[in-house]
Image (cartoon, helix red, strand yellow):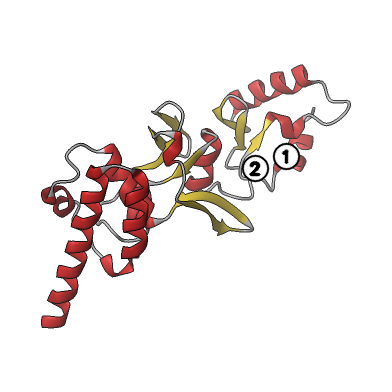
């Protein structure tokens, strides 16, 4: 395969896999050798084995962090601090994209940033949706309520009132309290349920403060 052929095939793709290049009559070993060569000269960026993006000079669409996160670890969805910041629920800036998976936890450093994965039980792998990220693309992302509860599930002492306060939660009026409680009960964890009640109490206190102004 020649460089121009590669660019012609994947120039519109933010990310591509080796399999996308294996058309009939194309030698798989030759493709892998070429990709290795083009990775060394910057034509191609390798994110993990079998997953690539064109270098900045050649790609026409920038990968979105959420789709990179999904592609790096199959069977994962973006959650935790990334979703909370995205919805304006916590004020801190985040310097990695956080996700949950039923597989092994860990982190991956790529040309597009750092991606962190936390392990949850298969029974808790729900509460996410396919979220548009532009140009007809989408990524699996937790609802804000599930992102809050995933955080509570994964952190120690999250059922203490101090934990919820230290998150410096804001814009709590955007949280669906009924969904938060329903999701918390589905976790089957007293810790997570207490956290949900603490968040709702903060939400009500915020409402009362607003009314009194």
| Residue 90 at x, y percent in the picture | 26, 56
Question: How packed is label 2: few (under 14 Cα within 10 Å), some, or many (20 or more)?
Answer: some
Residue 117's disc number:
none
For the C terminus, give its image quadrant.
bottom left
The residue drawn where x is 16% and y is 47% is: 163
| Residue 189 at x, y percent in the picture | 28, 42
Can the viewer see residue 23? yes
Which badge, 1 or 2, is on the more N-terminal residue? 1
Report which residue position mark 1 lands on: 7
Can the viewer see residue 213? no
Estimate the spatial distance between the alpha carbons at disc 1 and disc 2, rounded to whole Å: 7 Å
Name the image quarter holding residue 22.
top right
Report which residue position mark 2 lands on: 58
The residue drawn where x is 15% and y is 51% is: 166
Name the image quarter holding residue 119.
top left
Name the image quarter holding residue 85.
bottom left
Relative placement, left or right, of 1 versus 65 is right
Question: How packed is label 1: few (under 14 Cα within 10 Å), some, or many (20 or more)?
Answer: some
Evaluate if marks 1 and 2 touch, with contact meaning CB atoms under 8 Å apart: yes
| Residue 104 at x, y percent in the picture | 43, 26
The residue drawn where x is 65% and y is 26% is: 38
SS of the residue under disc 1: helix
SS of the residue under disc 2: loop
Judging depth in this view, the residue of 106 and 172 nearest the camera is 172
Q: Is residue 112 above or below residue 200?
A: above
Task: Give the farthest residue toward the right.
Answer: 25
| Residue 43 at x, y percent in the picture | 63, 33
The residue drawn where x is 39% and y is 28% is: 105
């Amino acid at each position: 395969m020649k460089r121009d052929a590669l660019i012609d095939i994947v120039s519109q793709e933010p990310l591509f896999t080796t399999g996308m290049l294996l058309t009939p009559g194309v030698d798989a070993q030759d493709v892998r050798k070429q990709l290795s060569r083009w990775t060394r000269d910057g034509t191609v960026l390798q994110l993990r084995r079998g997953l690539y993006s064109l270098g900045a000079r050649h790609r026409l669409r920038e990968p979105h962090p959420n789709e990179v996160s999904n592609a790096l670890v199959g069977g994962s969805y973006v959650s935790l601090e990334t979703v909370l910041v995205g919805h304006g629920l916590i004020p801190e800036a985040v310097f990695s994209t956080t996700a949950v998976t039923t597989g092994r936890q860990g982190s991956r450093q790529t040309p597009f940033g750092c991606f962190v994965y936390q392990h949850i039980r298969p029974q808790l792998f729900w509460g996410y949706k396919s979220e548009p990220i532009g140009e007809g693309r989408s990524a699996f992302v937790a609802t804000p309520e599930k992102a809050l509860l995933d955080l509570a599930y994964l952190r120690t002492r999250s059922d203490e009132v101090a934990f919820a306060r230290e998150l410096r939660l804001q814009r709590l009026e955007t949280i669906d309290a009924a969904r938060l409680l329903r999701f918390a009960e589905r976790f089957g964890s007293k810790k997570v349920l207490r956290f949900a009640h603490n968040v709702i109490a903060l939400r009500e206190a915020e409402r009362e403060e607003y009314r009194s102004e």
